[in-house]
Image (cartoon, rainbow, N blue to C red):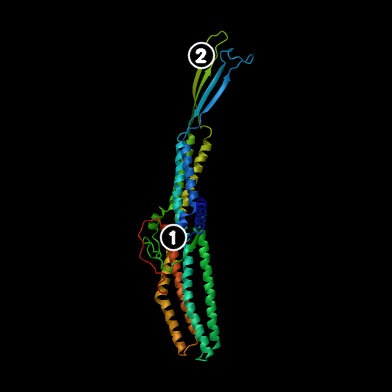
Amino acid sequence: MFIKGFKLIFVACVTALTAVTANAQITIRTLDQAIERAVTIDPWQHSNGLTQKALTAQSESVNTLPDPKLSFGLLNMPTDGFALDQEPMTQARIGISQAFNRGQSAELKRQQLLAMASQYPYLSDDRQANVAAKVAQLWLEGYGAQLSLSVLEEDRGLFEQLASTVEAQYSSAQGNTRQDDVIRAKLEVSKLNDRLLILREQRDASIANLSLWLMDDANLQDVDIVFPDAPLEIPFPQVLTQSAHLDTRLVSGFLMTHPAIQALQQKITASKTSIEIAQQAYRPKWALDASYSYRQDNQLGQSRADFFSIGVSLEMPIFGTQQQDGQIQSAKHQSAAIETQKRLMIRQMISQLNVLISKHSRLIERFNGYQTDILPQLRQQAEASLTAYTSDDKPFSEVMQAKIAELNGRLAMINIRIEIYKVRKHLLYYLGHVSMEPGNENINLLEGQ
């Protein structure tokens, strides 16, 4: 009875533990957590590592000699009797032949495969930087939508209070409140609710797209994304200036160590090795042959000596020089093509950095303009309109217009800040590999709200 009860308790515990494990979920609360998880569970990294291992294993097998060839045969067998002791030249022969690689072709192929394999760690680093940039863009979009939602939900109470006040004044015939003021107030509240729905849709879409990067296919754990209320700290790289122009010479040096460029450099090394491999075709190919021939005693019982033979064969590339020349030219052209790809990639990166730097500079100017001029003036205008309305100096429509303008200014300021952070995260894809201290140009995302 005790054993049966213990079994029931054990089964219940296992069932409960399984249920808890199945329902476990991961909560992502910060941008760094999202990036770290996306990079950690990225299935591309596993495929990249397997490809590198395959090339490394292949490099270990190419620098070997070809397999030897073993041969057996009967030589000079008389056709009138097929007897081994009839003719003195009849032999039972066993031979072995060993070919050697042409020049240093095997070692060069090994070096080429190792060079090809060495590009995959750089591709892994480039992938991590790329995933971090993409995840950051999605996370910031959802974060910005959440901040805009907070502002709208905060102001909705004010608009609803204004609508209730106007309706009460119209019902009691106080002041110069008219029916169209009541309609206008209710309409603005309805528009505000519609904007809330749009922002919720944008936030949910960002969460859905972000979940594709954070969902682990192996563990099948749910991911709960919670955007924080705390301000972000995404600094501008100190290695760059805040000017709208880029120091091309300085940044070109940084880009030469970028993982994507380093991966191309390894391909260039492998392609140059292909030229050396093609040049080995001009060298001769050697082979060593050895054989032992057994002869049977003659019909009178006299002993016959066995034979041992050894020889060297040499394959001379005399009549196929046109083929070798074509292979070398092909390898040189392929190497030059990859060199061109490298230069083009650096040029494209510099162009993208110029665009990002210029965009960042303009966004900073807009942000400062909103912070120091536009938003304070919009607030003053809204307060002045409300004061004038209470004194019956202005219609209610101007109060609503001023409040909506202030709300739009606050939302625009949030969007500008989010764009600034997107640019800074995008810059990290190009310069995140550079060892540097961040600048002090931080922007409090909740400042002035």
Q: Residues within 10 Å of mark 2 (few under 14, many from 20)?
A: few
Q: Relative to 376, is 232 above or below?
A: above
Instruction: State the residue in front, 176 or 371.
Output: 176
**Among all residues in the image, which is located at the extreme right?**
80
Query: In which image quadrant can residue 233 be found?
Result: bottom left
The CA span between labels 1 and 2 is 84 Å
* Amino acid type at mark 2: Ala
Q: Residue at x 55, y 86 (%)?
A: 180
On the picture, is 238 further left or further right than 34? left
Instruction: State the residue in front, 157 or 26.
Output: 26
Q: Residue 74: image x %, image y %?
A: 58, 20
Q: Residue at x 46, y 34 (%)?
A: 103
Instruction: State the residue in front, 147 or 338.
Output: 147
Q: Residue at x 45, y 85 (%)?
A: 386
Q: Residue 33 shows which numbered tag?
A: 1
Q: Residue 278: image x %, image y %?
A: 49, 39
Q: Residue 186: image x %, image y %?
A: 54, 81
Please give the residue where the numbered disc 2 appears in the rendered image: 305
Res 348 seen here: no
* Amino acid type at mark 1: Gln
